[in-house]
Image (cartoon, helix red, strand yellow):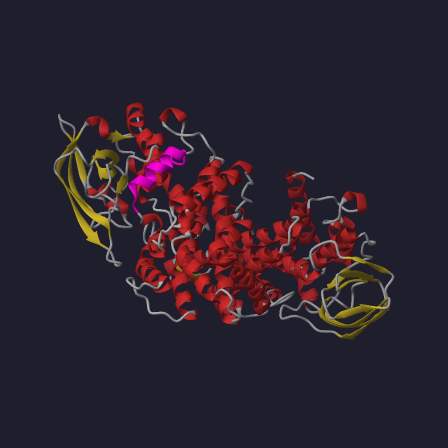
Amino acid sequence: MSDDISTMLVDATSRLFADQLDEQVIRRGRGGEWLGHAWAAIEEMGLPLAMVGEETGGLGIAPVNAMELIRTVGRHAVPLPIAETMVANHALAAAGLPLADGPAAIVPSGVRFADGRASGIARRVPWGADVSTLVIENDGKLIRLTNGWSVEGRASNIGGMRRDTLWIDAEAQSVASIASPSLLLAGATTRALLMSGAIFKALDLTIGYVNERTQFGRTLGKFQVVQHELAKVAGHAASSAAAADLAGDAYAGSGDPAVAVAAARLRIAEAVGETVSICQQMHGAIGFTREHSLHLYTTALLGWRDEYGGQRHWEDVLGRAALAAGPDDFWQFICAA
Amino acid sequence: MTQLAFRAPPIIPAAEELREDVRAFLATELRGRSAVARAESWTGFDADFSRKMGERGWLGMTWPKQYGGHERSAFERYVVIEEMLAAGAPVAAHWIGDRQSGPTLLKFGNEAQKQAILPGIAAGRLTFCIGMSEPDAGSDLAATRTRAERTGDGWRITGTKVWTTNAHRAHFMILFCRTSGKPGDRQEGMSQLLVDLKNTSGITIKPIIDLAGAHHLNEVHFDGAVVPHDALLGEEGEGWHQVMSELAFERSGPERFLSSFQLLVELIGVLQGSESDTARGAVARLTAHLLVLRRLSRSVAGMLEAGENPALHAAIVKDQGALFEQSIPEIARAIYDAEPDANSTNAFDAVLANMLLNAPSWSLRGGTREILRGIIARGLGLR
């Protein structure tokens, strides 16, 4: 599919979100409600199949273009497992398994597969109580389940996105060797893209606010100290976008994406800290209320930042790889990443 | 936010082939070069090395062949430059000419100027400096007071330029000065002149010693120095616009994030084999920044190659790049105990000292952090 068509799909997705997910709906979703109508519209548009080839029933967009859709989900901070279902289907299609039936979650670890059964506890599963397919990774195998689990507990991340605990004990009939990057890397890539989208949204809201809000007889945007704070956010936003692209390209490419994904996650984690801090600060007390919409994006960022691998994990991955390259080959390592 | 989009950098197979040639050349040429010398980055001066670069066809790479250029893509040039900087090659003798003065001449020079000068830069034989800052005109370039009066003999120049890199070794200066009007006219009435520093009387060049004790900067005093009428570069009175059009080229290259790369290499050297989480975490953080900056910088190179003027993007790269470069010595000393000492026989101690003393310049040269953030804020629609 050409870039133009991908751009059209991104535009159509933005319109769909605008139509189906106004702020009241988003707030209900962030309060824990499953947004069934919106999910139906999203499914009808084919977004869960965005990373699946046409030959296996997907949209046939290049995975690298599908990444742009995940960024759009992040920009709108949509409380539905769109990105998760996209990568779940991508992994299923690569492994030659049937695609997900309805919304899906990926379970990178914690569930064992032995003697034809998948068993264990899957924690903090996005909308775990509402998904109808689980895609589990264990010891190089990909396991597709459509039943055989129960909901142990319902919880949410700091951004009000549902993260439920599932008790799994199922006979696994769809099992194959994993043939795409690990589910942890898949999940981590989605978080990089989601965050890069929401960082831009937080920046946009803040620019709008400081150009409108007047104090001391001028708009806040006329104060140099405010300008320079937002210039810092712009630097983080641009860097986060490039970092997410790095991860997305590597995930969609043929090599091991671990280094690129780790770099993206670490760079974006730093950007999130600064962006949330500055955008909240620039919004003043008004932004510290649930009434204002800024928190929908800043709290989403704080939640996504630590999902599918935390700071120490990605530091370990990237730090080991860089130190293994050593002083003589470090530059070659950078160019090859 | 489309104005902040950084497109994916294109993949150019020819550029990657060239990378292997450059690495082979550098492995031979820089054999035995000390870590401290490599750490000089783009201030290391070696005229012989620059001539060898010229012989290889790695200077003036994108210029037309009729002016000694090689008509290669901006990406091939980018590869050569980043390999030079990553390896710590002494590029100063050709750096300003190849990067800034040559392109300015190509864009604004007349035919005679282009034929006379550009082949010399491309051969690595001519060194350039840029006369911009003055005692009372640093970031505020429009406050420039140096004047050139048109006389029967030519342009008669009076005034003082400061912090002029390599003026004491350069063959030519591209001088930014007032040719009409008065200081209150600000950007109006400015012009650029091509000054032959080796064959013009009335010019005094005095060293300015920098924080690291090195002599790269100079004060250049013009006491009625006369240059020919045809030394005018471009249009009289258009100097401001001519200078501004160069800035995107100057602000987004790999030199904007590789200034302290040598210290990162030394750091990885002393930490190699370490099982410390702190060490891994610090190296990981720096590596993440470096990978992202390189992608941003290469993205801007793609926009420049496509004929765009990504001034906002370039300002972001330079601002982010300087923050990264300046963070390296701070992080390095925090995870590896060492006393910075430029004269130490220990490479880490010596490179650390060099970086700590040079770091302040990285957010000053080529547009201060404050100026860049003003540009970025304007790009965001503030002010």
Nearest the camera: B314 or A22?
Answer: B314
Q: Is residue A148 visible?
A: no
Q: Is A3 on the left-hand or right-hand side of B87?
A: right
Q: Which of A316 and B193 lies nearest the eye of the viewer? A: A316
Span shown in magenta: B45-59
Residue B44 is a magenta residue: no
Residue B290 percent location from the top left of the image:
48, 55
- Is B222 or B207 nearer to us in this picture? B207
- Does the rendering let one see residue B46? yes
Quarter holding residue A264: bottom right
Q: Is residue B350 above or below residue B137?
A: below
Q: Residue at x 37, y 33 (%)?
A: B55
Q: Residue at x 40, y 33 (%)?
A: B57
The correct choice, above or below, for A9 with respect to A92 in the image is above
Which residue is at the front of the view, A193 or B173?
B173
Residue B250: horizontal and vertical position, in percent? 38, 44
How many numbered markers are drawn?
A: 0
- The secondary structure that dominates the magenta segment is helix
